[in-house]
Image (cartoon, helix red, strand yellow):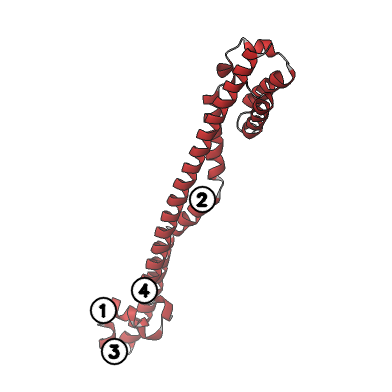
Amino acid sequence: MIDQASVVQTLQTLARQIGASDSGAALRLTMLSDAIEHGTNAEAWAYSDINTLIGPDSIVERYRKQQEVLSRKSFISHLEIIRNTFIFLPIIVTWFGISQATEAYNTLVSAAIRNKEVDIYSQPFIYLWQQRFGGLLPPYLTLSNVALFDVVILLIIVVLTFLTLSLAEKIAAEKELDAQRLRANLVQAITGATLYLHARP
């Protein structure tokens, strides 16, 4: 014998669970629950194809879509924004370093030409940059430091990408498991409701 209270409770729980993703299906589950608990339109439900009326496949699909939307608003989306912002930082850091280096190089070479210091302006640009153009450049803007900043930023981007993908896959797997549980619970509830309605005196 089918336990009426258990079927009613399952239907009501499912109606609450899917209320945000499919209000129409939630209403149909509530109506089916009323038919089992109070006999409201029980005969009409008994002679209907309950599975078609409830539509578990469309309920699960809407539930999946709602879960995807919620996932996009999650922590992962913030990580993606941070990562995408960091993508441009190496370019900014590099070009800022180059602009400061060329300005310092110009100042150093101009002074060397005025003072006829041939040994200074005959040195390679990269060597002078690493030597801070005779102290005209702050220590954090040497070529090696600019390169180090770029490497650190790129490593952060790699870590954020890996973290984002890992979390997204984990959350997607959990959401799919939730959707499969929902499908199983819907099938069980519909089966219980159908059997109960057909076994009614």
* Real-space Cα separation, disc 2 to disc 3, in angstroms: 57 Å
Q: Name the residue under label 3.
A: 117
Which label is found at residue 101? none
Quadrant of image for the N terminus: top right
Tell me which label, 1 or 2, sits earlier in the chain. 2
Residue at the (57%, 42%) spot, across then down: 70
Q: Which of marks 1 and 3 is in front?
A: 1
Residue under label 2, please give it. Answer: 76
In depth, the one of 154 and 13 nearer the eye is 13
Question: Which residue is nearer to you in this view: 1 or 197?
Answer: 1
**6 left or right, relative to 69:** right
Q: Which image quadrant is residue 44 in?
A: top right
Numbered disc in front, either 4 or 2: 2
Q: Is residue 62 visible?
A: no
Q: Residues within 10 Å of mark 3 (few under 14, many from 20)?
A: few
Q: Check disc 4 and report its element: helix, strand or loop.
A: helix
Rendered residue at 32%/86% (across/down): 112
Residue matched to label 4? 102
